[in-house]
Image (cartoon, helix red, strand yellow):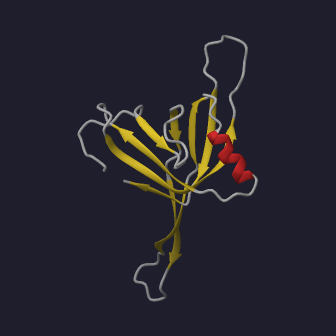
Amino acid sequence: MATYRDNPYGAFNFLVNLGDSTESETVGGFSDVSGLGVDLSYSEYRNGNEKFNTVRKVANTYKNDDITLKRGLVGSLTLFEWLKNVADGAHEPRLVTITMLDEARNPVASWELRNAQPKKWTGPTLAAKGGGEVAMEELSLVCEDCTYK
């Protein structure tokens, strides 16, 4: 689905599907997605008869960074219930999909987080001063694989 163009896409137009088949419609859009990244590990290897006195770098395993989602608190308990179920011992991995859209809201790129599970939920910071801020909740996810499509 990745689509090439000369001008980069804006980072403000995206959808997040948490893989919850019981929720048929989006309940509060996410304002931020961060942490899409991969960390590759390499092993050092050298033959005894190598021509050069240096080691080779051989790729082995990799790990994905934790993904952080932020949204305005809308009263939906689905994120908190998922976190609570996992904290209580349930095994509830999901296929989470993050889809970037172009200006016409057509999908142009997506990331699939395989076996994503909640790691941390942070509630809003409540402060009586000012009164202009939005109450935000934050969910950190771990996943076994992050595939760019």
* Count of residue discs: 0
Q: From this view, report whether residue 124 is shown above or below residue 93.
A: above
The residue positioned 29% from the left and 32% from the top of the image is 104
For this orientation, the residue located farthest to the left is 6
107, 10: nearer the viewer:
107
Picture coordinates of residue 72, whole percent (x, y): 58, 28
Specify the quadrant of the image occupied by residue 100.
top left
The residue positioned 71% from the left and 12% from the top of the image is 129
122, 57: nearer the viewer:
122
Q: From this view, report whether residue 97 is shown above or below residue 42.
A: above
48, 78: nearer the viewer:
78
The residue positioned 47% from the left and 75% from the top of the image is 54
For this orientation, the residue located farthest to the bottom is 49
The residue positioned 30% from the left and 50% from the top of the image is 1
Would you say 5 lies left or right of 107 here? left
Picture coordinates of residue 106, whole percent (x, y): 30, 38
Picture coordinates of residue 7, whole percent (x, y): 26, 36
75, 143: nearer the viewer:
75
Q: From this view, report whether residue 51 is shown above or below residue 7.
A: below
Picture coordinates of residue 9, whole percent (x, y): 33, 36
